[in-house]
Image (cartoon, rainbow, N blue to C red):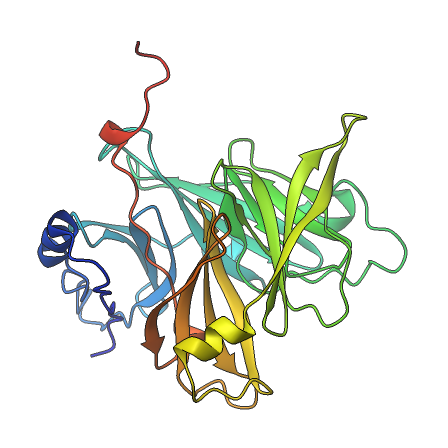
Amino acid sequence: SDTPAFRPLRLHSDPDLAAAVRGGDFLLTRLPDEIEGVAPEWVIQGCHDGRVVLVSYKTGHMAVYNPLTRALDLFPRPPGEICEDMYVEYHVLPSDEDRGPFRVICVCHEACGAQAAVLSSETGEWQVFPFLEAAAMQPALQPGDDNEKCSGNGTLVNGSIYWTDGSRALARVLNTSTLHFSRIDLPPHIEGQGALTAGETKDGKLCIIGTVKLTLVVWFRRTDDDGVERWTQHKTFPLEQDIHAHDHCFDNDHIALKVLAIVNGFVYLSTYCEPDRDLPGLFLSFCLETAKLNKLCTVLYPESLYPYIMAWPPSLLLNEVSP
């Protein structure tokens, strides 16, 4: 079958979690195998707050699926004219209410500029926003930074999408409330540093993590005494020995780290072999607070890995309005 599938993790004997997983559809069997006589060949675009976004380039449909609740929504993909000759990605913005309406943001971008379209699950229709030239985004690029790259998906953190795998000096940001594109400065570049990934700390603050070989370099966004927000290097975490403890067969000369997501102070990452990325790797989690590295599982294809993190039910979250 061409339908993607999830590999469950059995790390703890939590009866409630086990029951939820048993009742879920992590083989994605509810996705339609045929739409108007055509096999969709679904492709995962991302996972956020318990929902999986998939698209079919064969039929022109998009699916938003919650494997736990088995709630499936099918929508048309955005109008073709905004997706031509640009990189396209999708992000789901959850509702504050359990099973409430949600939004999907489609972002089309290249070095020359970017454009966004928003779909409401209530109407199923796309609202397309104007294309913004890169030269109009603020703060402006400085001389030497005009080779701005926007390869790869952005990361949704606290209502904004960050594209940190680009220019070494500035990164693009999209405010999902205002649909306004801007830029943010990046931490100083470190020799040998790989791609930067944005995420959130345990207290919900913005952070950025880079990798230098098998070491994590963590930066926090803090306000200095002058009231100006700046990047402060928090810590570096060498992980070579811990990774070797989980996989005695690995060759540290050819193994590299890829940060997949940073959620609530936990870093989800994978190892891969630089000469041959088709070789199996490890899927790991790292706690920024305790500096503990856990092996979650071995993965056969590290390049095609999407962490699925369940959302907290709104009924269990602190209500700041009610006494």
Residue 203 vertical position relative to residue 246 in the rendered view, above or below: above
Residue 183 vertical position relative to residue 28 in the rendered view, above or below: above
Q: Answer with the quarter of the image where residue 322 lies.
A: top left
What residue sits 16% from the left and 47% below the top? 69
Q: Position of residue 39 (x, y in %)?
A: 22, 73
Quarter of the image with the C terminus in it:
top left
Frontmost residue, 165 versus 240: 240
Q: Answer with the quarter of the image where residue 205 lies.
A: top right
The reply to whether residue 256 is in sight is: yes
Frontmost residue, 140 versus 76: 140
Residue 69 vertical position relative to residue 22 in the rendered view, above or below: above
The reply to whether residue 130 is in sight is: no
**As drawn, which residue projects farthest toward the top?**
323
Q: Along the horizontal axis of the image, is 24 left or right of 64?
A: left
Q: Position of residue 117 (x, y in %)?
A: 49, 44
What residue sits 53% from the left and 48% below the top? 199
Q: How many marks?
A: 0
Quarter of the image with the N terminus in it:
bottom left
Q: Along the horizontal axis of the image, is 136 left or right of 202?
A: right
What residue sits 22% from the left and 66% below the top? 8
Q: Position of residue 181 (x, y in %)?
A: 64, 41
What residue sits 29% from the left and 39% below the top? 312
Frontmost residue, 19 versus 126: 19
Residue 117 vertical position relative to residue 87 in the rendered view, above or below: above
Q: Along the horizontal axis of the image, is 234 left or right of 5?
A: right
Q: Position of residue 153 (x, y in %)?
A: 53, 59
